[in-house]
Amino acid sequence: MEIVIRAAVLFLFLWVVTRIVGRSTVGELSTFQLILYIAMGDLIQQGVTQQDYSVTAAVLAIGVFALLTLGLSWVNTRVPRLRGVTHGVPVIIVRDGVPDLHRLRTERMSLDDLMSSARQEGIRRFDEIELAVLETNGRVSFFMRADGSTGEPAHPDTT
């Protein structure tokens, strides 16, 4: 029973740490985040099993993690109000071509990272963006201006 309690406590700790570290998809993890997650895996194993190398301990620890993961998924589908706590909420990071620097700082996202995501969508300048949303999975959704304008004043022809 001790292993089950240890696994549950450490699962919750891991969940909190991953929520604090930020919204990154696996392919976009920084070197530090990747090292942190790899090291956490080994440290968690030691903390859960107290160096108990039995198959029973491993099955119990993995089973608790799996059940808690399923439990969180169930809560997300049954209690929509808690979804913001368990998975986060999408946030607007660009509105009418202007990046929200405060929100970017809060989400630990640089302007360079934002522009890199925009370029991958074929966007050259922020003023082409009507709205950009940082999704809960770490990806950015871009919504372009419907009229194709850039928000800049028209330049008179010199012909």
Image (cartoon, rainbow, N blue to C red):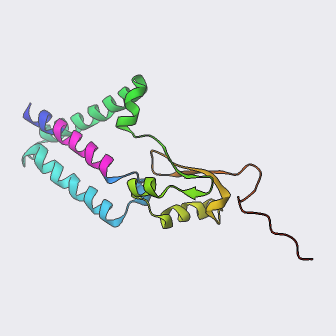
Percent across and percent down for residue 85 are: 35, 36
Q: Nearer the viewer, residue 15 or 127?
A: 127
Magenta-span inclusion, residue 9: yes
Name the outermost residue toward the top. 78
Quadrant location, the C terminus = bottom right
- In the displayed structure, 1 sits above or below 112; it is above
Percent across and percent down for residue 77 are: 42, 26
Q: Is residue 50 left or right of residue 87?
A: left
Q: Is residue 72 left or right of residue 125?
A: left
The residue at the point 22 percent across, 52 percent down is 41
Q: Is residue 59 left or right of residue 138?
A: left
Q: How many marks?
A: 0
The residue at the point 23 percent across, 35 percent down is 63
- In the displayed structure, 74 sits above or below 14; it is above
Q: Nearer the viewer, residue 38 or 17?
A: 17
Percent across and percent down for residue 31 are: 34, 66
Quadrant location, the N terminus = top left
Percent across and percent down for residue 87 are: 39, 39
Instruction: Magenta stretch: give its range.
Output: 8-20
Q: Is residue 127 left or right of residue 18?
A: right
The residue at the point 80 percent across, 69 percent down is 155
Give the main secondary structure of the magenta stretch.
helix
- In the displayed structure, 99 sits above or below 158; it is above
Magenta-span inclusion, residue 59: no
The residue at the point 65 percent across, 60 percent down is 127
Name the outermost residue toward the bottom. 159
